[in-house]
Amino acid sequence: MKQRRLGVWFIGAKGGVATTATLGLLALKNRLAPPTALVSQLPEFADLELLDWDGWVLGGHEIRETTLLQEALRLAEAHRTFSKDLVLACQQELEALEANYRWGTLYNVGPTITELACPACRQQQGTAAESVARVQEDLQEFAQANDLDHVVVVNVASTEPPLQNLPEAATWEELQQLIQQPDCPLPASTLYAVAALELGYSYLNFTPSLGASLPALDHLAQLRGTRHMGYDGKTGETLLKSVLAPMFAKRNLHVMSWVGHNIFGNMDGRVLDDPANKQAKVTSKDRLVRHILGYAPQTLVSIEYIESMGDWKTAWDHIHFQGFLGVPMVMQFIWQGCDSLLAAPLVLDLVRFTERAERAGHVGRMEFLASFFKSPLGVEEHDFFEQFRRLQQWARQLAQVNC
Ligand SMILES: NC(=O)c1ccc[n+]([C@@H]2O[C@H](COP(=O)([O-])OP(=O)(O)OC[C@H]3O[C@@H](n4cnc5c(N)ncnc54)[C@H](O)[C@@H]3O)[C@@H](O)[C@H]2O)c1
């Protein structure tokens, strides 16, 4: 049987997460690294017949003038994300990928992200409708040039500021009219999602940006028979919240306050240092504790850019709760992880499961992927283990169909 060819198109293709996912994929293809931290390699997914790494072709949109090799070397040398030897072992393949990158759209991304863009990228900008058309041309050219069976578009671009007072556009037809307006209020992340879904490609939003969160985008996915999921990857501190909060709930321990301070110094941190961009992230990190507990303790989430920390994030959480007889107690934890290394395997997993969902004919939101996201679309359940059970259940159902 002919090997399936899957295109993976990163929005933010030379950022920390995309570069690490790209290098990770090459390392896996070349058997240079073990599959540690890949959820899709767990035994419960062995019967799913997930696509192996050889059929993947990568490309994407970027706004900065740089190469993938430069970015990988920077992560190795300045951030100690992975070893320089690994980068050099994959150098030729990283260089060969350069042909697959195009300038992205800066439509409504706000001043902090616009400042990152190089002059060549800035020159290519147009209206919202022109941006969608240009992104679609790039995607179609990528699919044709590489003889692809399907494309999964993954948003791993910088976090956009949240937009206030977006007009109601419940249907795809209404949204289409909005896109045609010269002052269309939608951000780039949504225009990318429109471009992908309209072509029948799958779309994943790993960021807190708006992306495909509007109901009209789900409507578009339904109409085109394609699929999407988001948003905001659950990789570190919030992952721990979704594991620990159910424990407090199930032991009837009353959480009075939950404070989480995060410090890190990569480019994502620099963008989130703008209060407008930070707001999207804080909102996404803050909501799940009260969802899980069923009441609202006092919460505080801080995210501070500390340049010397580079890609290594430290989160310190202080949980003040009441035990028996109302006696106050404290739990604290410190999480120290490498941001890009936590995110990259999840991105590869999400693409793999999405490709499998495409083969199975899944249409609309992929709610079985909830455990990967801080704010899973269409899912009220925030308990990590309950969310993970949904993934296992989906896998079991598909495996039974295969039999
Ligand atoms: N690393 C994690 O653990 C993690 C967890 C959850 C979510 N995220 C989110 O993933 C995203 C990527 O994180 P990162 O650490 O790679 O950030 P990064 O700043 O290293 O990379 C973002 C990349 O996107 C590019 N970009 C920005 N706007 C663009 C646009 N409109 N079109 C095309 N490219 C654009 C930037 O030039 C940059 O290369 C962020 O939104 C972050 O909040 C990361």
Image (cartoon, rainbow, N blue to C red):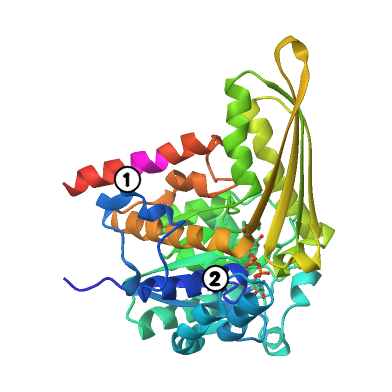
Crowding around mark 2 (Cα neighbors within 10 Å: few <14, some 14 to 19, many 20+) is: many
Classify the position of ligand 1 by quadrant: top left, top right, bottom left or bottom right. bottom right
Amino acid type, residue under disc 1 in the picture: Glu
Residue 166 seen in this snapshot:
no
46, above or below 267, in the image? above
- Outermost residue on the top side: it is 325
Q: CA distance from mark 2 to mark 1?
A: 26 Å
| Residue 217: numbered disc | none
Residue 306 seen in this snapshot:
yes
55, above or below 369, in the image? below
- Residue shown at 79%/70% (left/top)? 112
Q: Is mark 2 within 8 Å of ligand 1?
A: yes
Identify the secondary structure beneath mark 2: helix
265, above or below 327, in the image? below
Q: How many marks?
A: 2
Q: Which residue is mark 2?
A: 20
- Residue shown at 69%/72% (left/top)? 107
152, above or below 65, in the image? above
Q: Whole-percent x and y of residue 73? A: 60, 82
Is residue 394 one of those drawn in magenta?
A: yes
Relative placement, left or right, of 332 versus 204 is right
Is residue 137 one of those drawn in magenta?
A: no
Q: Earlier in the sequence, mark 2 or mark 1?
A: 2
Q: Whole-percent x and y of residue 206? A: 57, 58
Q: Which residues are magenta?
A: 390-395
Relative placement, left or right, of 268 versus 229 is right
Identify the secondary structure beneath mark 1: helix
- Outermost residue on the right side: it is 275
Relative placement, left or right, of 287 versus 394 is right
Residue 388 vs residue 310, the one in the foreground: 310
Q: Which residue is mark 1?
A: 44
